[in-house]
Image (cartoon, rainbow, N blue to C red):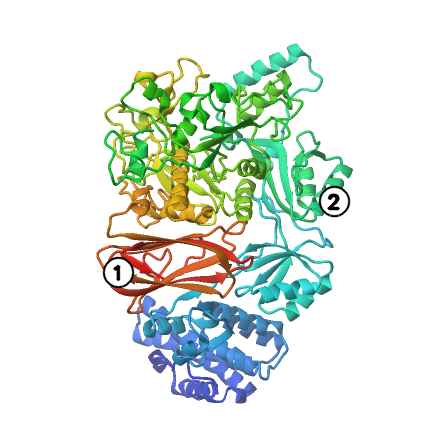
């Protein structure tokens, strides 16, 4: 018997003739009680019932003069119900296979619980063998039933719903198949149970591309495969997969693993023998290439004379000046230069051989798994691109983009009571100076470029000062510049950018003190040592290169640029790490808004392999306003600030309204055309976010930036090598040759990097944590952040954290020197968790006056989106649950971010439990850090 979930005949049925009504009610009872006894006579009877009912309806309409709309509604109701019964009868007693399949498709469209039960009943004795029957059941089930993770035991969930479908029991949760009514029942009876709907896997059948270009896989090609799991991956399953003859290459998500498979038979063995495998499909490379950039790439004449080139340059400049801005220029891509990353060195070498055999030029082979490919001279660059995209073992393919450059007052905004107060030192100040720490800064250059003659504010504290050459670490082509391979000294002679950011991080104000100036411009960590990596180089463009640049970007080539950035950021970070730096500050980026590109991947990979190395990155200066009512537009954060394992910094306003009254609209009329932002002063409110500061989110939904710090009119050191009339945002009149004002997220970033040095010093000296993880340092900076009440916030920024300010503006005193009633506990867990493992911490809350705040930070495995997923859970003395980042109390665990927080404004007095759960750890174990503050005792 099928459970009676089909509705009884509606009252509208009363309008049809008695004979038809009796047929309908008789067969209705048979459908409900004995569907297996339905036969051809019942089908004939239902067909007659429908025909006669239609005639009756037409007759009634004429007799009773029913309004057309009312009649149509009545007719639809009656016909639909009769047709529903008729289709069910047809399923059990079809006249032929075609009739049966039509009824199946109709039932699939209805797709309710009753239809599902009918189809399941038919599978016991189907009148015809049809794949449509199983497909319809699968589709309806997928719509009605959700695969969920419930954080409780199997016994607990069965006490609520005995018939619930248990897929698998883990130690800390169960995977179940439930419908919406079951979910509602669980939430009603046990609101403390956490229910997470497991998202469906995303299987790509085409090459992922930043454009509409679709490249199909060549038939017969044996590519690396993606194993899609429908539940959290256990280590035993991975061992089982490898024992079947595969090589696991890497996870690419929480429940997806890329493997190298020698033959098709093994794929079927994995499907048949490994638990949790939902599907296996060929890996599709991640492609970020705009095909338009591969058309008409090089318009420079071949074998042209000097005079011909000069004439062509003049014509190109006139054309560029009269035309609209080039879309390529906005992204600063290098047309025709493609970066291919492979899973293994063997894949890279095999790919290089294949390309060279086809006449495609390999420009460079940085590292072990990367190729730089130049298709700019190819007769058909698009065809070359397609050949590259088909290579076995290819992980990703990108265009190269050109990187861009993106404080005595500011330091007190973010570090009051932590550094020494000036001019009136307080006995409660911690007097942290960064002593014993080394900060690495990668930027343009540093003052004179000579340690012996360097700006006095860095005297005796520059431990390393080096520069990076144009080749082989950039993509300027040899035929376009005459000094290919040249390495400029680390002089800061153009913008003064590198000298300024270094002063914000660790300048000590020595020069100002020697001059007797009362205002002493100093950075955050005045006794930290500096590791400086100069990235700015001056290419000597030849005529052919000048013409190419104008045709490509619509302007003359710059005299200098960050052409020393290595193709693999590992080279940059490794040198700093080997020099002893554990903090790396980067005030530059690429305008790949929100993208998790190869630079972000490289950063995440290095930090994953060096867990005590904190990388601080500027969010970018691409905030702009396209509406008078919506604030600053979201989605402008730059790479590598899109990485998971860095600390991305946005800019808030400084407090300098007495000296500067400039507005955003005056400086950038095109970016900020509407009031109130247009007329907003740039340094009049420390609780405002700088309008230019780039906003999140990332493409995968992660919050960025992580924190903000002052970034307008920041006073810091000035390079002695820049033009005598160059003072950036403003001259510092008492010593304008030695200090100046600048602004941007570039200036906010070194303030945070210097703050990180203070945090490390504090942990070493006062907490006796000799080598803190970057996760702990990052966690402390985030934990210290305060949400500021930004006057012109975007409507999407009501929640906290958000994509304008992240977790807020850092305030180190809240963590390092808090009020006496607040205690702060730091937990650095190097021994990580695997899937279905957890760790618990007990703490005693003594007062409900001091808020309870807990921050969880961990260094995730490299790859787009969250790979390893840890979840934070707090349980109050009365059993109330609080989840990380669930500030709306919806009972939803975070599965996007590797930073989670909980804030309880008035915590219950008594014993609380903090639990960190390894929800999905495909590449473990996963270490983490916790920062806890309240009036507490922690065990």
Q: Nearer the viewer, residue 424 or 776?
A: 424
Q: Position of residue 738 (x, y in %)?
A: 38, 18
Q: Earlier in the sequence, mark 2 or mark 1?
A: 2
Q: Quadrant of residue 538?
A: top right
Q: Please give the name of the residue rendered at 62% of the width and 72% of the height, measured from the top-left corner.
A: 131
- Is residue 125 in view from this perspective? yes
**SS under mark 2:** helix
Q: Residues within 10 Å of mark 2 (few under 14, many from 20)?
A: few
Distance between the alpha carbons at the discs numbered 2 and 1 = 60 Å
Q: Quadrant of the C terminus?
A: bottom left
Count of picture labels = 2
Q: Please give the name of the residue rendered at 40% of the width and 46% of the height, measured from the top-left corner.
A: 763
Is residue 900 positioned above or below 876 on the image? above
Q: Position of residue 654 (x, y in %)?
A: 30, 32
Is residue 537 positioned above or below 927 on the image? above
Q: Please give the name of the residue rendered at 70% of the width and 47% of the height, measured from the top-left corner.
A: 347
Q: In front: mark 2 or mark 1? A: 1
Q: Which mark is residue 635?
A: none
Left or right, residue 345 beside residue 181? right
- Residue placed under numbered mark 2 in the picture: 350
Q: Nearer the viewer, residue 758 or 155?
A: 758
Q: Position of residue 621 (x, y in %)?
A: 41, 33
Q: Nearer the viewer, residue 425 or 359?
A: 425
Q: Position of residue 175 (x, y in %)?
A: 48, 70
Is residue 928 positioned above or below 391 on the image? below
Q: Residues within 10 Å of mark 1 (few under 14, many from 20)?
A: many
Q: Please give the name of the residue rendered at 45% of the width and 86% of the height, measured from the top-left corner.
A: 32
- Is residue 705 in view from this perspective? no
Q: Quadrant of residue 78?
A: bottom left
**SS under mark 1:** loop
- Residue placed under numbered mark 1 in the picture: 907
């Amino acid at each position: 018997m099928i459970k009676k979930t089909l509705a009884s005949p509606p009252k509208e049925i009363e309008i049809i003739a008695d004979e038809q009504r009796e047929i309908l009610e008789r067969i209705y009872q048979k459908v409900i009680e004995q569907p297996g006894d339905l036969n051809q006579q019942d089908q004939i009877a239902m067909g007659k019932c429908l025909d006669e009912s239609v005639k009756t309806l037409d007759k009634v309409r004429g007799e009773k003069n029913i309004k057309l709309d009312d009649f149509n509604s009545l007719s639809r109701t009656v016909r639909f119900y009769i047709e529903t019964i008729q289709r069910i009868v047809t399923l059990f007693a079809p006249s032929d296979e075609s009739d049966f399949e039509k009824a199946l498709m109709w039932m699939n469209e209805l797709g309710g619980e009753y239809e599902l039960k009918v189809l399941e009943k038919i599978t016991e004795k189907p009148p015809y063998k049809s794949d449509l029957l199983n497909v319809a059941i699968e589709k309806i089930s997928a719509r009605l039933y959700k695969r969920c993770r419930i954080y409780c035991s199997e016994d607990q969930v069965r006490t609520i719903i005995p018939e619930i479908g248990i897929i698998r029991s883990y130690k800390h949760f169960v995977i179940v198949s439930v419908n919406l009514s079951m979910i509602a029942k669980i939430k009603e009876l046990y609101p403390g149970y956490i229910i997470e709907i497991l998202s469906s896997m995303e299987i790509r059948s085409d090459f992922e591309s930043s454009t509409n270009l679709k490249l199909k896989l060549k038939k017969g090609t044996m590519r690396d495969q993606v194993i899609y799991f429908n539940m959290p991956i256990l280590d035993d399953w991975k061992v089982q997969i490898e024992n079947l003859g595969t090589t696991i290459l890497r996870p690419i998500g929480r429940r997806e693993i890329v493997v190298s498979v020698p033959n098709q038979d093994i794929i079927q063995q994995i499907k048949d023998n490994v638990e949790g495998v939902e599907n296996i499909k060929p890996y599709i490379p991640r492609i970020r290439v705009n095909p338009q950039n591969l058309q008409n790439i090089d318009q420079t004449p071949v074998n042209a004379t000097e005079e011909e080139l000069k004439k062509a340059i003049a014509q190109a400049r006139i054309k560029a000046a009269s035309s609209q801005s080039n879309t390529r220029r906005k992204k600063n891509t290098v047309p025709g230069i493609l970066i291919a990353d492979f899973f293994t060195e063997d894949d890279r070498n095999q790919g290089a051989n294949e390309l060279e055999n086809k006449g495609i030029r390999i420009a460079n082979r940085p590292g072990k798994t990367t190729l730089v490919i130049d298709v700019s001279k190819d007769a058909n660059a698009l065809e070359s691109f397609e050949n590259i995209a088909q290579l076995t073992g290819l992980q990703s393919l990108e265009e190269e983009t050109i990187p861009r450059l993106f404080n005595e007052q500011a330091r007190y905004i973010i570090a009051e009571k932590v550094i020494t107060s000036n001019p009136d030192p307080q006995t409660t100040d911690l007097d942290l100076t960064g002593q014993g720490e080394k900060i690495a800064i990668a930027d343009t250059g540093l003052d004179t470029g000579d340690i012996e003659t360097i700006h006095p504010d860095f005297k005796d504290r520059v431990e390393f000062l080096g520069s990076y050459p144009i080749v082989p670490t950039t993509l300027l082509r040899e035929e376009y510049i005459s000094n290919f391979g040249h390495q400029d000294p680390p002089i800061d002679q153009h913008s003064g950018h590198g000298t300024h950011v270094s002063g914000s991080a660790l300048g000590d104000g020595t020069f100002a003190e020697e001059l007797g100036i009362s205002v002493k411009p100093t950075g955050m960590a005045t006794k930290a040592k500096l590791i400086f990596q100069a990235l700015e180089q001056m290419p000597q463009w030849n005529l052919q290169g000048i013409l190419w640049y104008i045709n490509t970007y619509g302007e003359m080539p710059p005299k200098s640029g960050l052409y020393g950035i290595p193709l693999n950021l590992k080279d940059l970070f490794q040198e700093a790490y080997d020099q002893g730096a554990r903090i790396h500050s980067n005030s530059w980026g690429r305008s790949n808004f929100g993208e998790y590109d190869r630079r972000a991947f490289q950063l995440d990979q290095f930090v994953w392999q060096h867990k005590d190395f904190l990388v601080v990155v500027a969010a970018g200066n691409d905030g702009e306003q396209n509406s008078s009512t919506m604030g600053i537009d979201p989605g402008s954060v730059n790479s590598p600030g899109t990485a998971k394992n860095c600390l991305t910094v946005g800019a808030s306003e400084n407090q300098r309204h007495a000296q500067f009254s400039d507005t955003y609209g005056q400086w950038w009329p095109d970016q900020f055309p509407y009031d109130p932002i247009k007329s907003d002063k740039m340094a009049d409110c420390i609780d405002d976010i700088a309008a230019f500061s780039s906003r999140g989110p990332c493409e995968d939904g992660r919050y960025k930036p992580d924190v903000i710090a002052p970034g307008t009119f920041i006073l810091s050191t000035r390079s002695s090598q820049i033009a005598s009339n160059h003072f950036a945002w403003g001259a510092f009149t008492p010593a304008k040759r030695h200090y100046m004002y600048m602004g941007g997220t570039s200036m906010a970033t070194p303030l945070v990097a210097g703050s990180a040095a203070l945090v490390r010093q504090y942990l070493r000296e006062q907490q006796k944590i000799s080598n803190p993880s970057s996760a702990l340092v990052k966690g402390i900076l985030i934990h210290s952040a305060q949400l500021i009440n930004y006057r012109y916030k975007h409507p999407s920024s009501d929640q906290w954290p958000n994509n304008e300010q992240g977790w807020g503006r850092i305030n180190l005193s809240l963590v390092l020197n808090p009020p006496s009633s607040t205690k702060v506990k730091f937990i650095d867990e190097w021994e990580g968790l695997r899937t279905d493992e957890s760790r618990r911490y007990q703490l005693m809350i003594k007062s409900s006056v001091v808020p309870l705040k807990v921050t969880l930070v961990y260094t995730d495995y490299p790859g787009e989106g969250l790979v390893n997923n840890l979840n934070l859970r707090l349980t109050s003395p009365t059993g109330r649950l609080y989840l990380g980042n669930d500030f709306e109390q919806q009972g939803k665990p975070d599965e996007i971010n590797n930073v989670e927080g909980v804030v309880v404004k008035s915590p219950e007095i008594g014993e609380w439990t903090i639990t960190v759960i390894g929800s999905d750890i495909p590449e473990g174990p996963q270490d983490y850090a916790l920062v806890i503050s309240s009036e507490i005792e922690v065990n």
